[in-house]
Image (cartoon, rainbow, N blue to C red):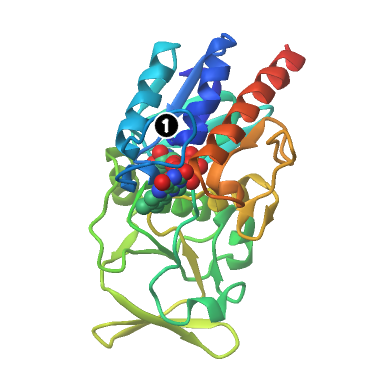
């Protein structure tokens, strides 16, 4: 399925951008789950509309986007890959091709609830298999996660080592049939024990489980829960600043064809900011695609 624009995020930033891309006749796909705004019971500080619930505002935004021709899907993005000048977006249900991508995935996710993780960052603990996997040729490596995002990280590591374990930290797997088949076909070891901490001297050496058992390991790649904007950024070579995606005043990242808007770019986390940045991104995506055709 081919699109001019793939918007990752169904919040104010992504929905706002889609108004400009669809009205500019660009084939637009919006992917996402729940916006942070849904949690806002009454939104009073948004100009030019009476107080409404966050849910009502988002529903209206989705209706508007669909009205102008956007395809809106309730899907979670597990991976984004650049191929030549286009992008392949893998969700929990489908694979899409886009000529441009807007990352509008909201605030970045919270830290992984495992002791000592921070102490081993870059010393055995990593957040991007495509970036750091090559350090671990034939080593015993784990991926921490339980969604399709974690399975994509395993796929990335597969050519580097066959000694792979998926650690779910007590979570049930939430993966699609393709991912289940992959785990079966590749006979990936799955360890579901909740993890207490990671340990080692200078570098990571083992995982300690809550049941007081332990397992030796050389590398652990974190892909816990849903992929965040920072995870996409790391894989695509997008510059990150203060744990947010760095954009210029036109919402462009340093990677041509990839734009970002809203809370994932840092700054004033409000609906009005997200809508404004989304509008600029939508306009700029139009100019970018026009300049290429
Ligand atoms: C409780 C609460 C109350 C708030 N009240 C107000 C208020 O009164 N006024 C105000 O102006 N602001 C308020 N905010 C802030 C406001 O909600 C945010 O600033 C705004 O929603 C940011 O918009 P966004 O589009 O950048 O991100 P979000 O609205 O967070 O949307 C992010 C989108 O990205 C999607 N996404 C994330 N990861 C993936 C993935 N891997 N694959 C696919 N989709 C993904 C999410 O499902 C979601 O659709 C409130 C926030 C909270 C939490």
Q: Residue at x 39, y 12 (%)?
A: 67
The reply to whether residue 181 is visible in this rendering is yes
Quarter occupied by residue 212: bottom left
Horizontal and vertical percent position of residue 63: 35, 19
**In the displayed structure, does residue 239 sit left or right of residue 107?**
right
Label 1 belongs to which residue? 31
Horizontal and vertical percent position of residue 149: 42, 49
Q: Residue furthest bottom?
A: 201
Instruction: Determine if the C-beta at disc 1 is less than 8 A from ligand 1.
Output: yes
Q: Residue at x 26, y 73 (%)?
A: 193
Give the position of the N terminus as an image quadrant: top left
Q: Nearer the viewer, residue 138 or 217?
A: 217
Q: Residue at x 36, y 27 (%)?
A: 73
* Label 1 crowd bin: few (<14), some (14–19), many (20+), radius 10 Å: many
> Height in image: 91 above or below 96?
below
The reply to whether residue 151 is visible in this rendering is no
Q: Check disc 1 and report its element: helix, strand or loop.
A: strand
């Amino acid at each position: 399925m081919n699109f001019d624009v793939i918007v990752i995020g169904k919040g104010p930033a992504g929905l706002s951008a889609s108004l400009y891309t669809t009205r500019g006749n660009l084939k637009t796909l919006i992917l996402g789950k729940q916006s942070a705004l849904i949690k806002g019971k009454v939104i009073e500080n948004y100009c030019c509309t009476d107080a409404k619930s966050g849910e009502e505002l988002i529903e209206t935004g989705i209706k508007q986007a669909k009205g102008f021709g956007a395809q809106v899907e309730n899907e979670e993005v597990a991976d984004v890959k650049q191929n030549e000048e286009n992008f392949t977006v893998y969700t929990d249900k489908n694979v899409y091709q886009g000529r441009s991508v807007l990352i509008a995935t909201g605030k970045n996710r919270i830290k992984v609830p495992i002791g000592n993780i921070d102490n081993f960052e870059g010393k055995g603990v990593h957040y991007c298999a495509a970036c750091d996997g090559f350090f671990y040729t034939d080593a015993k490596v784990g991926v921490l996660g339980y969604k399709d995002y974690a399975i994509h990280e395993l796929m990335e590591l597969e050519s580097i080592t066959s000694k792979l374990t998926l650690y779910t930290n007590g979570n049930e797997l939430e993966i699609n049939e393709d991912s289940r088949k992959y785990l079966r076909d590749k006979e990936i070891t799955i360890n579901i024990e909740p993890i207490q901490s990671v340990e080692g001297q200078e570098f990571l050496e083992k995982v300690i489980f809550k049941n007081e058992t332990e397992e030796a390991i050389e590398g652990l790649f974190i892909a816990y829960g849903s992929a965040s904007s920072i995870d996409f950024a790391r894989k695509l070579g997008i510059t990150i600043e203060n744990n947010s995606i760095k954009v210029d005043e036109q919402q462009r990242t340093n990677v041509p064809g990839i734009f970002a808007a809203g809370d994932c770019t840092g700054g004033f986390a409000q609906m009005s900011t997200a809508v404004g940045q989304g509008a600029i991104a939508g306009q700029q995506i139009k100019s970018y695609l026009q300049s290429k055709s």
